[in-house]
Amino acid sequence: MESQQLNIVFLPYPTPGHMIPMIDTARLFAKHGANVTIITTHANVSSFQKAIDSDFSAGHSIKTQLIQFPSAQVGLPDGVENIKDGTSLEMLGKITRGIWMLQDQIEILFQDLEPDCIVTDMMYPWTVQCAAKLGIPRLHFYSSSYFSNCACHFIRKCKPHEGLVSDTNKFTIPGLPHSIQMTTLQLPDWMRNKSFATGYFEEMFESEERSYGTICNSFHELESDYEKLCKTIMGIKCWSIGPVSAWANKDDDEKKANRGHMEINNIGNEQEWLNWLNSKPNDSVLYVSFGSLTRLPHLHLVEIAHGLENSGHNFIWVVRKKDRDEGGNGFLQEFEKRMKESDKGYIIWNWAPQLLILDHPATGGIVTHCGWNSILESLNAGLPMIAWPVFAEQFYNEKLVTEILKIGVPVGVKENKLWASFGEEAIVRSEEIVKAVEILMGSGQDSKEMRMRAKMLGDAAKRTIEEGGHSYNNLIQLIDELKSLKKSKALAVKEDYSFDGWYVIHL
Ligand code: UDP
């Protein structure tokens, strides 16, 4: 007799902002009875294998299935298999090419593993066809906000930015329940200028429409208007099951510390940052992080350093190792020394145990690049934010945080750009940073209200993943639906009639 247990294969995209929430999601499915396999490469698995082993030891049916990254074929050194490892545009291109080349291996695995369902990252649009061939549902994994998905959808469809006299002129995003304005310069490059990437992103968004449904790392209480818009006007079947990081990493501090990065134990003195935070009053420290991919030009680093120092508030700043070495004649090392002497600031080089820092009572706010995971994680800790978007959909997230949820202050970034050098006019000046820090960390009414709203959303985030909460119920309902599909498919096969009706409808 065929097993009733759901067999689900997860395919994460190798960049921390996509991989971390998908691994957390896979672990949640296993925790709720599914038999889970995660397909990944050797270098990537080392950042999360420990969590999988510990879940497996706890009795959950979860394993990893490794495939070979074509390092030699694309001309990369061994172990460079993740977008975050790219230190130049050329290297990024090679990593991306390597990821594309995995397609054949993945397709074979999909066949061999005989899943009842595949959950694949938004960056793998071709998996829609794989699912169709196998006659199983594909769930699209969207790793950002509903708001960003809706904003992007309506800008793609209505093109309100086309025909404006200047790319610094404002336009209103059509189709949204709130009146939100932005400029063409704040849109991702693939929207501003037609390129190969434009076709790829279009394909990606279309693949969502052709999938069985979308799993969203968000929650009803946070973005109900946009969850609804996605379901109704955009016609996407969605399940909000977030925040998955809070849900999957509830109990285990060690897991939190090691999450997302294999070198966490080699990057300096963990006890030191903890002692430093322990020595600070509650809510007094600003955590400053630009996520896993952003590399800031030297000029920007100098402005941030001066801005933080001049604000007079305590801070922890995560700086990429690459940034340390780039120009500036040891500026950052000098700065670090000065901050140690004044005891005002602490630099973490390269990778921080973000969840642990955000949860620490001394942390009172975050400067964030508006990566969705960082927003959810700080929100879960009840923290208000300084929004400093850098690239991709982060500018939409800035709007959500500052204008809709009203839990953040914009620092005033004008241009959407990853890595490339900024013109002088696009640099955020230290005075603007001081101003934003003063609003966020000060004792004014604005700060109090933002802090209160952030705390309320943090409470809602905690409730939604508990038994009976929206996200909890959505996950259970999704699992039940997939089980019924499996059952009806088994029945159909038994009764020997063709079972392709449901996926024809959805593809
Ligand atoms: N992260 C971390 N330590 C760091 C930098 C990032 O743990 O020093 C984690 C962070 O907690 C989040 C993810 O990496 O879960 C980054 O995702 P996000 O969507 O915030 O931004 P991205 O890196 O994709 O730009």
Image (spheres, rainbow, N blue to C red):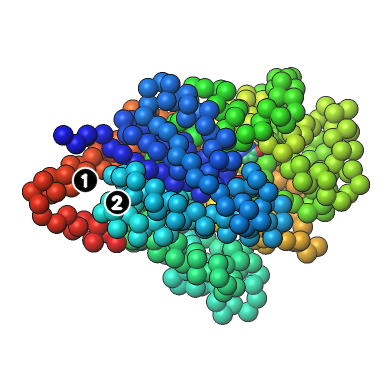
| Disc 2 C-beta below 8 A from ligand 1 | no
Q: Amino acid at mark 2?
A: Pro
Q: Residue at x 68, y 49 (%)?
A: 77
- Residue 472 in view, yes or no: no
User: In the visual, does 290 lie left or right of 178?
Assistant: right
| Quadrant where the image shows the N terminus | top left
Q: CA distance from mark 2 to mark 1?
A: 9 Å
Q: Quarter-wise, where is residue 64 in the image?
A: top left
Q: Residue at x 52, y 32 (%)?
A: 49
User: In the visual, does 324 lie left or right of 449?
Assistant: right
User: In the visual, does 388 lie left or right of 332?
Assistant: left
Kindly identify which numbered label has been placed on residue 485.
Answer: 1
Taking the image in four quarters, ligand 1 sits in the one at top right
Which of 269 and 117 lies nearest the eye of the viewer?
Answer: 117
Q: Are marks 2 and 1 in contact (CB under 8 Å)?
A: yes
Q: Which residue is mark 2?
A: 137
Which of 221 and 339 lies nearest the eye of the viewer?
Answer: 339
